[in-house]
Image (cartoon, helix red, strand yellow):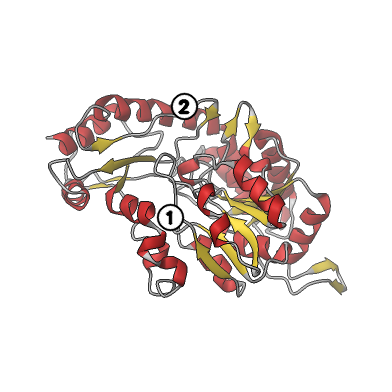
Amino acid sequence: MIINNNTPIFVTQPTLPSLDEFVKSLEEIWESKWLTNNGKFHQELESELCKYLGVKYCSLFSNGTLALIVGLQSLRITGEVITTPYSFVATTHSLHWNGIKPVFCDINEHDFNINPNKIEALITPQTTAILPVHVYGNPCNFEKIGKIADTYGLKVLYDAAHAFGVNINGQSILNNGDMSILSFHATKVFSTIEGGAIITNDKKLKERIDYLKNFGFADEVTVVAPGINAKMNEVQAAFGLLHLKNIESEILKRKAIAITYRNQLENINGIKTYNDFEGVKHNYSYFPVLIQKDFHKTRNEVYQLLKEHNIFSRRYFYPLISQFPTYKELPSSSSNNLPIAEKITEEILCLPIYGDLKPEQVDKIVQLIIK
């Protein structure tokens, strides 16, 4: 296959279910005239996700950002929350929308996640929670974060937008902390077109979450909280059920692509790749590399070169959330506080990875980079 300017390649592309099966689901929805509000497909998807993910309770949302906002509301988080600057802006925006002050903590270079050894120094009397992110699906250090939370009486919400299906020694990483928040956006490994979910092991918390995502209604005449409209509709849920059937195949294909990239790039001077972590079942949602100073081109030059060949890699995450005008004046946004995050954001490049990416396309991408 020849890649030219008429053949764009993106960082990720959605895996679509069978059109015939999807049309059949749409016909069933059409006939039932039940388009949203906890319909058949919604209930079935929640149930099937609990089984697949190995979790107790799943509450579906129309998108992951609303899931983050409602998750914070459901735990009654206030004051300050310690989080990472190395994430998608929705992580910090969810705090802002709840009137919570984000406090940025530096990250690790080996997994891009929040550095638990830096958290305690940032705790103040106003700190109520920690909001870490499983960046690229790499599991955070649950044990250290959990011990800190227990010591200081803090809640822990994991932004698991990248971490669908990730487990350690057969146990889902979504069962850690007070809750985990997933994204099912079209660019994710598992998709409902738009969508998200909150995972929890607490039945009463699941009930409160479900009230909050539906205007606060407990029944037809009782509103128990100032909720919001964040429900997933039947079309999204039907799409998700079909996508779930093929998720293991998609992950295996991505794994093969990741291995190919790694084999071809790991010995190139100035390019740093990352191996799978021992005992972790990854989902290969992204393939990050660092373009370091001793490579013959800068990260931005590599990004632009690929773009000129209609290959759209992504500087993900660049810039840091702490560098955006909305947050850069916060004391914790100081460069002195975030040296590793600021280094990584200048070197990171996520290469295209999705199940339908062809071996010859991967080879072309690699050759463009190294030559």
Q: Nearer the viewer, residue 148 or 246?
A: 148
Task: Find residue 23 and report its horizontal and vertical position in percent.
Answer: 56, 45
Quarter of the image containing the N terminus?
A: top left
Using the rendered image of the protein, determine whether residue 1 is visible from the camera's viewpoint.
Answer: no
Residue type indicated by callout 2: Leu
- Position above or below: 192 against 251: below
Instruction: Give residue 218's quadrant in the image.
Output: bottom right
Quarter of the image containing the C terminus?
A: top left
Q: How many marks?
A: 2
Instruction: Give residue 264's quadrant in the image.
Output: top left
Left/right of residue 296 with respect to residue 189 in the rendered view:
left
Left/right of residue 37 with respect to residue 294 in the rendered view:
right
Task: Find residue 250 and report its horizontal and vertical position in percent.
Answer: 48, 32
Q: What number is the disc on residue 333?
A: none
Q: Nearer the viewer, residue 152 or 240?
A: 152
Task: Give the SS element for disc 1.
Answer: loop
